[in-house]
Image (tube, rainbow, N blue to C red):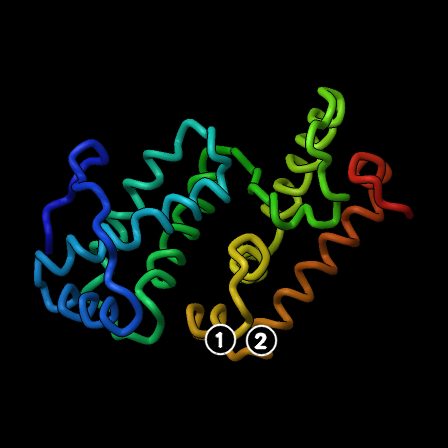
Amino acid sequence: MARWLAPSSVPPPAPPAAGDALMDVARRAAEGDDAATQEVLRAVWPTMTRVIASVLGSTHPEVDDVLQQSLIGLLRSLSAFRGECHPAGYASRIALHTALRARKRAGFRRARTEELARLEPEERSHPSPSEEAAGEQRRRVLRDLLSDLPDEQAEALALRVMLGWTLDEVAAATGAPVNTVRSRVRLAKEALRRRIESNPTLADTLGVER
């Protein structure tokens, strides 16, 4: 297993191997090839960072710590990689679970749902300060709602909506049938809708008619 690299000492990202090439690199990394492990880290580093920032918020003070924990988790898990899904998806799941655990453990029950906020009207080019404040409040409420979902539903919704994965991609990454993934996403959306519609404060904040 390759030695852990602190963020400041990680080599600058190199052009990552794509498609089947990265799969081959990841398999070599799983067999203990240090050079291949470094290449995998460089390839998935940006994706893992984006996942963590999506869950915690890009300005969250623990983003760097959670990224480090996620990379350590990836290094420890590479030996179990069997190529069932793309390495970036494998790394994304590790980052997602690490970020979700960090948020709950620290009491930050907020998940960034910029993409989930498609329920909102598209922002104008130059929103006023009051509109920006209202938008941020809506996003905070949605993060809290997402964090209350069962883990499997939260994971499916995050991968499907926040990261924009297809149902097939979520199924491949989670090992669940496509119909199960579809059901989890549907149940998650229904749960969020019920919470919003049954709570006058949430409904008013999000602008949802009851």
Camera-side residue: 133 or 68?
133
Camera-side residue: 19 or 138?
19
Residue 54 screen position, x and y as percent: 50, 44
- Residue at mark 2: 180
Is 96 rendered above or below residue 32?
A: above
Residue type marked 1: Ala
Residue 111 screen position, x and y as percent: 56, 42
Residue type marked 2: Thr
Q: Residue at x 42, y 52 (%)?
A: 97
**In the orientation shown, which residue stands out farthest toward the front?**
125
- Residue at mark 1: 176
Q: Viewed as shown, does residue 91 lie left or right of 81? A: right
Instruction: Give residue 92's quadrant in the image.
Output: bottom left
Residue 203 screen position, x and y as percent: 83, 41
CB contact under 8 Å: marks 2 and 1: yes
Q: Residue at x 84, y 45 (%)?
A: 208
Crowding near the residue tagged with mark 2, few <14, some 14–19, many ≥20 C-alpha atoms within 10 Å: some
Q: Viewed as shown, does residue 45 lie left or right of 40? A: right
